[in-house]
Image (tube, rainbow, N blue to C red):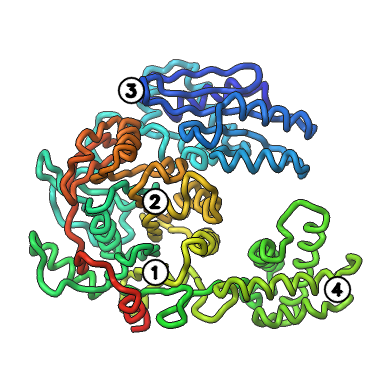
Amino acid sequence: MCAAGPKWLQVIAIFRVTRRSQLLDHRAGQSGRGLLRRLRPREWRHWTFRMIGASHHIAALKRLNDGIAASGLGPEMPDRCFVVLRNLAWSDGPATQACLTQLKEWGGLSLAVRGDDLRVFEALRQMAADEDPEFETWLRARRPAGGTELLSSLFGALTFPVPAPPQPSTAGFERPARTVPEVTGDRTAVIPVGRRLDTGADLELKLSLLTRHTAVFAGSGSGKTVFLRRLIEECALHGVSSIVLDSNNDLARLGDPWPSPPPGWSDEDADKAARYFAETEVVIWTPGRSRGRPLTFQPLPDFAPVLDDRDELDSALGLAVEALASRANVDGASAKARKGKAILRQALGHFARSGGGDFTAFLGLLAALPLEVSQIDRADQIAAELGQLLTAATINDPLFAGSGEPADPEQLLSPSGGKRARVSVISFIGLSDQARPGFVNQLQMALFSWIKRNPARGRPLNGLYVMDEAQALVPATPKTEALASTLTLASQARKYGLGLVFATQTPRGLHNHIAGNATTQFIGRINSPTQIDVVKGLARARGGHADRVGRLDTGQFYAASDGISEVLIRGRQCLSHHPSDPLTEQEIIERASG
């Protein structure tokens, strides 16, 4: 595998990050290591790739440690990323697993290289060697490498945006002001995001581009909340449902109409508002609060529909085991953990084939496991201990197998009859700061499973997932429970048609891979000098400057996206009521229970 390293890295350098006016330094040695970096002063981002094909665990671990050291990866180096390409399984040994855990915590990745990707890259390498003068134009138009599993999961939509070749524009970010198309399944459907300050023309975003994710960086008083709400509302007008995480009690008014037209309200805004409230269902959820509309996580699926399909049953059992393993303390690599996990799976299989039931019934089975369920020594005693740990989990975490509506993405994203879209606002009033990342992690795991079963199937956008104050849930440091599932969604959700929106007042505090997976970014007014330096760096990475970011008016944003380096816009007023004060806890509960 290492012998092919230079060719691989040459392909990645040429076909993924080439951009006019940017200098790239590419080096690949016999070790299979390659470095890609931008050479402009203070604007570079450093990627290290290393292929590790050693089969012996000691040799593989040495190469992994050497690669981490050579890349400069570390908790204080957010501009560095180390990517290990390896098809062989890593050792289960504690030293290797500790090193891999450190790699992930510092923002590194270990990825496999698939045969289909190899064929694409080899074909592109041969085409480049032919030196056809039309090759670069074809490459920029088609961008075949970006469709490979490796690069789409690795870079998502960030890297360095490639300008389209000169041609009649159909990219659809900038258009003259006009009525938004109503055909939900039309992949050319667009939504307005604001009005350009230089030309006065509307700036519009292709609905399908939201699947490549969006980041909003803006401080207090910038108009960030209004901007987010209008984005959600415009998507709802196209029949796109949303899940919205509300940390500050200022998004739960998405279902409240304006009592009177706000300043600057146009006839078009009034018409859209009328359609929005007629066609959109806004539901407020209150996990952790029995009053209102509580949400809980039911760890066991309904096994009955899959009993006749062995593959589907195995899949359902696998999901259930993963949902319970950490709670039962059997998600480790020790012999005891592996044995416990095997007994847990056997017990679940017996439970499913015996008619299933609720979680209380399953705990009863674990307390008195029949001898025929498992041949593992002391299986009945181990099962009883697992049952005790799971019972303790229900006591310590009321959201786990508790009372309330199940946190099912199907329910959160499916409107009632007569409505085109549902906006599910999940209020955090019932969750402590410490409990929020764990709740979000469980929600995101359920969401990922749901989108894999329910891909977009021709629709430009299957749904929207909005995380406000993202720095509190997926910070740069320390690692939280929500980080791994967030990174999985950020890298994989695009292929299933789910759009992610991350918003934060402190971009420096947000994990760098979150912002790095967003094709579209909006930068509003920020007052902190430290945060200003961060967003200016993000803007320069797209070819912009954001020079006035500390002096922007409320509602003004720098916009950057595919083919757009920087445009200054003024966002539109939201269609729902937005007074200056957030809702109280009692007001949120009243809206949820209503």
Task: Choose the circle earlier in sequence order: 1 or 3.
Answer: 3
Q: CA distance from mark 4 to mark 1?
A: 41 Å
Secondary structure at numbered mark 4? helix
Q: From the top left corner, tell me how far across and down residue 447 is, in percent.
A: 50, 62
Q: Nearer the observer, disc 4 or disc 1?
A: 1
Q: From the top left corner, tell me how far across and down residue 74 is, in percent.
A: 55, 34
Q: CA distance from mark 4 to mark 2?
A: 47 Å
Q: From the top left corner, tell me how far across and down residue 511 is, in percent.
A: 46, 44
Residue topped by disc 2: 211
Secondary structure at numbered mark 3? loop
Using the rendered image of the protein, determine whether residue 312 is visible from the camera's viewpoint. Answer: no
Q: Amino acid at mark 3?
A: Arg
Q: Which mark is residue 427?
A: 1
Residue topped by disc 3: 20
Q: CA distance from mark 2 to mark 1?
A: 24 Å
Q: Nearer the viewer, residue 213 or 590?
A: 590
Residue topped by disc 4: 380
Q: Amino acid at mark 1?
A: Ser
CB-based contact (under 8 Å), mark 3 and mark 2: no
Q: Amino acid at mark 4?
A: Asp
483 to 591, vertically: above or below: above
Q: From the top left corner, tell me how far across and down residue 283 is, in percent.
A: 36, 74
Q: Nearer the observer, disc 2 or disc 1?
A: 1
Task: Choose the circle earlier in sequence order: 4 or 1.
Answer: 4
Residue placed at 85% from the left, 72% from the top? 381
Task: Choose the circle earlier in sequence order: 3 or 2.
Answer: 3
Q: CA distance from mark 1 to mark 3?
A: 45 Å
